[in-house]
């Protein structure tokens, strides 16, 4: 590769290059590493920092490597906040090292080197000795061990109670025929079981199904890292089986002239087709979002706003006023997203990586993220005292908020062809039921 290599990126040390190296190895890209003295000694401090590292790759691979989203994110990451410091502030940071972490001091030394700044020899020797002896604050045990998340398994009892309440409210408030309330509950349950089984196949944890009175139900589960393919399969696993069951029941209802089977099939088909409409938080809306703009924050917001407007108009037009709770929840979701975005922006300034799982989070990262939550979200301010690292009575609630902030991005494993196929399947789900029903009627007409 020697004659065909091109420089990919220069890093201050080998640790900074680990993510890029892991990516290259996982994707089987040929690369080489060149280490050389970083030149961060500012003419005075020597051997304080690790050697500078340059990653070289094959010229033919360069464009492909640069097309990956993870590479774009790593290369476009915001510069460390110390780069905004004036020359005087940089010198102050280096000469008052106890106020900064070892990593921050190293970065300050690099900036001083780049700017040609000078540091007193006596102070330089003290800094070198302190770094070598691990004497700065980030190596002291001031950050306690992060708390362990309590896992509460979803119980069958809770699911059963939610089902009973769902049936009871339809009967006493909407005065539906009890038989068709049971049919509706069965249709909804089968739909959610489809999601449940798909999540189980993909090894989700803490699975459960819960009914929402007068609205519907949802299947819940937890997994740290998911892919687009898995997410789309899970979303389709609810409505598709219901539509197929509905078409089968429609056929038998038609040939036997059975009114009950025909009405039951209509509930199966219409409810599941409605669920595929491209509006949040329906399965159809989630599919479109997952496939096309999961990582585009602006389009996500516009999509949510449109969903709120459409659902509000539908609820009012159909006089189903209890459904207005859905757009209300979506508005609440927008508010939460705005707060999370603000916290993430602050974490970026402090170079805290939040694209990781809770297990990957260091003790220091947990407590610093926790501090930011207390500063930005009024509700948590009453439980979190800045820089006081003790467990709160509401720590489990804080952990949930931390996990909402550090959620790992879904793995983008759908090609353009895959997205076209999924879109095609989604469109067919609206067309095929009507084609099949028309075919049933034509066939019976000939017989």
Image (cartoon, rainbow, N blue to C red):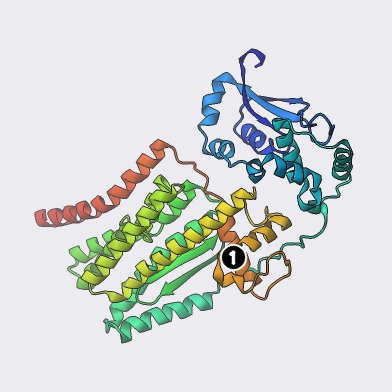
Question: Looking at the rendering, which quadrant does residue 282 occupy?
Answer: bottom left
| Residue at 61% across, 29% down | 28
Towards the viewer: 429 or 353: 353
View extreme (left): residue: 446
Question: Looking at the rendering, which quadrant does residue 332 occupy?
Answer: bottom left
- Residue 346 location, x and y as percent? 59, 54
Question: Looking at the rendering, which quadrant does residue 2 occupy?
Answer: top right
| Residue at 86% across, 50% down | 135
Q: Is residue 348 above or below residue 11?
A: below
Towards the viewer: 229 or 405: 405
> In the picture, which quadrant includes the C terminus?
bottom left
Residue 105 placement, left or right of 7: right
Q: Is there any visible trace of residue 153 in the rendered image?
A: no
| Residue at 25% across, 69% down | 261
| Residue at 71% across, 64% down | 387
Residue denoted by label 1: 400
- Residue 63 location, x and y as percent? 52, 25
Q: Which SS class for mark 1?
A: helix
Residue 259 placement, left or right of 404: left
> In the picture, which quadrant includes the N terminus?
top right
Please count the marks in the image.
Answer: 1
- Residue 443 location, x and y as percent? 15, 53
Q: Is there any visible trace of residue 237 in the rendered image?
A: yes
Q: Is residue 291 above or below residue 270?
A: above
- Residue 10 location, x and y as percent? 66, 29
Residue 424 placement, left or right of 406: left
């Amino acid at each position: 590769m020697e004659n065909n290599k091109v420089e990919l990126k220069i890093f201050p040390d080998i640790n900074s290059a680990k993510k890029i190296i892991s990516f290259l190895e996982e994707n089987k890209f040929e690369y080489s590493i060149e280490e050389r003295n970083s030149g961060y000694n500012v003419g005075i401090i020597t051997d304080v920092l690790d050697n500078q590292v340059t990653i070289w790759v094959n010229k033919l691979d360069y464009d492909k490597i640069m097309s990956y989203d993870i590479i774009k994110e790593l290369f476009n990451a915001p510069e460390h906040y110390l780069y905004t410091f004036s020359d005087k502030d940089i010198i102050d940071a280096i000469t008052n090292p106890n106020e900064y972490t070892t990593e921050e001091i190293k970065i300050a030394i690099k900036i001083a080197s780049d700017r040609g700044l000078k540091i007193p020899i006596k102070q330089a020797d003290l800094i070198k000795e302190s770094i070598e002896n691990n004497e700065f604050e980030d190596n002291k045990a001031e950050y306690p061990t992060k708390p362990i998340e309590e896992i509460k398994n979803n119980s069958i009892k809770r699911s059963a109670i939610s089902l009973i309440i769902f049936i009871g409210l339809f009967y006493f408030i909407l005065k539906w025929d009890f038989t068709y309330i049971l049919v509706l509950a069965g249709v909804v349950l089968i739909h959610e079981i489809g999601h449940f089984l798909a999540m189980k196949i993909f090894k989700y944890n803490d699975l459960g199904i819960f009914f929402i009175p007068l609205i519907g139900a949802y299947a819940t589960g937890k997994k740290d890292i998911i892919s687009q393919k898995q997410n789309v399969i899970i979303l389709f696993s609810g409505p598709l089986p219901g539509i197929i069951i509905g078409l089968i029941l429609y056929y038998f209802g038609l040939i036997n002239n059975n009114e009950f089977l025909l009405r039951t099939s209509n509930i199966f088909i219409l409810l599941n087709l409605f669920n595929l409409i491209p509006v949040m938080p329906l399965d159809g809306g989630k599919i479109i979002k997952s496939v096309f703009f999961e990582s585009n924050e602006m389009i996500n917001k516009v999509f949510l706003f449109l969903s709120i407007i459409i659902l509000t108009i539908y609820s009012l037009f159909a006089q189903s006023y209890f459904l207005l709770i859905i757009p209300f929840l979506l508005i609440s979701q927008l508010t939460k997203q705005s707060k999370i975005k603000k916290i993430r922006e602050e974490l970026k300034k402090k170079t805290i990586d939040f694209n990781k799982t809770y297990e990957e989070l260091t003790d220091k990262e947990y407590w610093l993220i926790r501090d930011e939550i207390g500063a930005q979200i009024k509700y948590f301010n009453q439980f979190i005292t800045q820089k006081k690292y003790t467990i709160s009575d509401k720590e489990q609630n804080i952990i949930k908020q931390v996990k909402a902030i550090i959620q790992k991005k879904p793995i983008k494993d759908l090609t353009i062809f895959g997205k076209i196929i999924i879109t095609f399947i989604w469109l067919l789900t609206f067309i095929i039921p009507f084609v099949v029903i028309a075919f049933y009627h034509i066939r019976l007409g000939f017989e």
